[in-house]
Image (cartoon, rainbow, N blue to C red):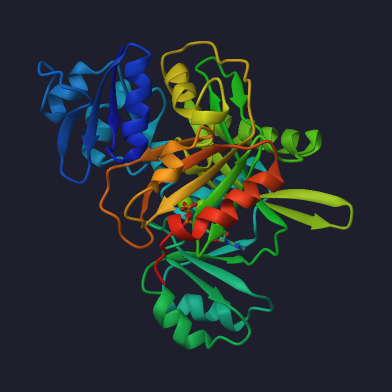
Amino acid sequence: MKILFIGDGQLGQMLGASATRHGHECLLFSTRTNTVKPLSAQLDLPHKLTQAIEWADVVSWEHEAIPADIMTAARAKFLMDPERIQRLTDRRDEKSLFDECGVPTSPWQAFTTAAELEQILVQAEQPLVIKAARGGYDGKGQWRYTMATDPHELAQQAGQVPGIVEQLIPFKREVSLVGARNQDGSICCYPLVTNVHDRGILSYSLGAMDVVTDALQQQAEASFRKLTEALQYVGVLAIEFFVVVDGSDVQLLVNEIAPRVHNSGHWTMTGANCSQFDLHIRALTNMPLPLLRLEPTLMLNVIGAAQIPDALWRHPDVECFWYNKEPRPGRKVGHVNVRTPNRDTAMTWVEQWAEQLQVLAD
Ligand code: ATP
Ligand code: MG
Ligand code: MG
C-alpha cells in the first residue's frame, strides 16, 4: 500500500519506519515546511502535496492538526471523517465528546473572554486548572488557580484566548490506555501504563509492569470502545486518565485523548511483539489485530539533553531512540526503553538517569 502521513516529527518518522518494514511505500508531509519527504532515497515518488495525495491509498497523521486544504483534497483517502478528528484539537469539543459518550471526566466549563473567566474564578470554591482551548501540549497553555490567586490578574493572563476551566483532580496516579480500532470495529489495547509527569511533560512510563486490576483495565477499555465508536475511528488512539481513589472505590477520569500514536506507547517498541506503530499500520491496512505478548519495560524520555550517554547505548537491557532534533530545554529529543523485571528496578533506573537525560524549561 501507499501511505501518506501528515507530519514529519518523531512520530511520523517512527510510523514511516514501521510502514516501510511492513512492505508499504510511505511519504511524510511536513506541515512546518510544507514539503513532501520520502522516508528513504526513493527518487521516483511525488514531491508535491497534490501529487502525493493522489499517489496515496491511505492518508494518516502523526498529529491531529490537519490543514484544511489537505482535509478537502484527501477526503476520500482518510479511513474516517477527518473533521471528527480535527474537532479534537479544541478542548471544548473534546470535553463535550466525553460528556456525550458518558465517559467520566473532570467537571468543566468553557469561557471565551477574560471577563467570563474572571466570573468563573471569583465563584470558585476549589482549585482549578485553566487550559487554552487550542494548541496546548506538554503542559503549555495551562494555569493553576488556587484560593490564594488573584482572579483578575490570572484572568487577564489566561483569558486572552478561549479555553476551559476544570477542577484540579487530586489523583493518585496517571495512567494511559493505548490501543487500536480496526476497520471492522475490533479493538486491541495494551495494558494501562503508569505515566509520571514533571512540570507538565511526560517524564517516564511504566509499561506492562503495573498492578493493574482487571476491573480497571475493563473500565478503560469500555471508554476506549465508546470513544472510538463515536468517532468511527480507525488506527491507534491514546486515552490519558487520572486514577481517583475514594475509599475502596477506584475510578478513572479521562483527562484527554490523542487520536494517534502517543509518547506513553513508546515502551511497546521494546516491550511488545507488536509496537504501537506496527499496530497503527495493521489497522490502516486492515490486517487482523494481534494477540499481544508483552514484557515489562520502562520508557524514559530524553528531554533537552544534548545526547544519550554512551553507557546507555552500550547497555544490553536498553534500547535508545534519538530523534535527530536540536536539543532545547523542555523539548523531547529521544527516549530510552529499559527492560526491567519490575517496578522497583525501573525506579532505580529512573533515579539514576532522569536528571541527566532531562533538561526541563523553568
Ligand atoms: P500532553 O503533552 O499530554 O498532550 P497537555 O499539554 O495536552 O499534555 P494535559 O495532559 O491536559 O496537557 O495536562 C498535562 C498534565 O497536567 C497532566 O498530565 C496532569 O499531570 C496535569 N493536569 C492536567 N489537568 C489536570 C487536572 N484537571 N487536575 C490535575 N492535574 C491536571
Ligand atoms: Mg494534550
Ligand atoms: Mg496530556
Residue 171, placed above or below residue 294: below
Closer to the camera, 296 or 220? 296
Query: Considering depth in this image, is 74 or 302 the residue closer to the camera?
Result: 302
Q: Position of residue 69 (x, y in %)?
A: 21, 37
How far from the left and from the top, in percent, is residue 204? Answer: 55, 49
Residue 36: tell me if it is visible.
yes
The location of residue 303, given as percent across then percent down, is 40, 55
At horizontal 53% and vertical 88% (from top left) the residue drawn is: 150
The quadrant in which residue 280 appears is top left
* Whether residue 253 is situated above or below residue 35 in the rendered picture: below
Q: Quadrant of ligand 1?
A: bottom right
Residue positioned 36% across, 31% down in the render = 14
Image quarter of residue 160: bottom left
Q: Residue at x 64, y 78 (%)?
A: 124
Residue 103: tell me if it is visible. no
Vertical placement of 214 versus 41: above or below? Answer: below
Q: Horizontally, is 24 left or right of 236 in the view?
A: left
Q: Position of residue 163 (x, y in %)?
A: 45, 64
Viewer-proximal residue among 84 and 270 = 270
Indicate the quadrant containing the N terminus: top left, top right, bottom left or bottom right: top left
Q: Is residue 97 left or right of residue 249?
A: left
Task: Please give left or right for residue 248 compared with residue 257 in the image.
Answer: right
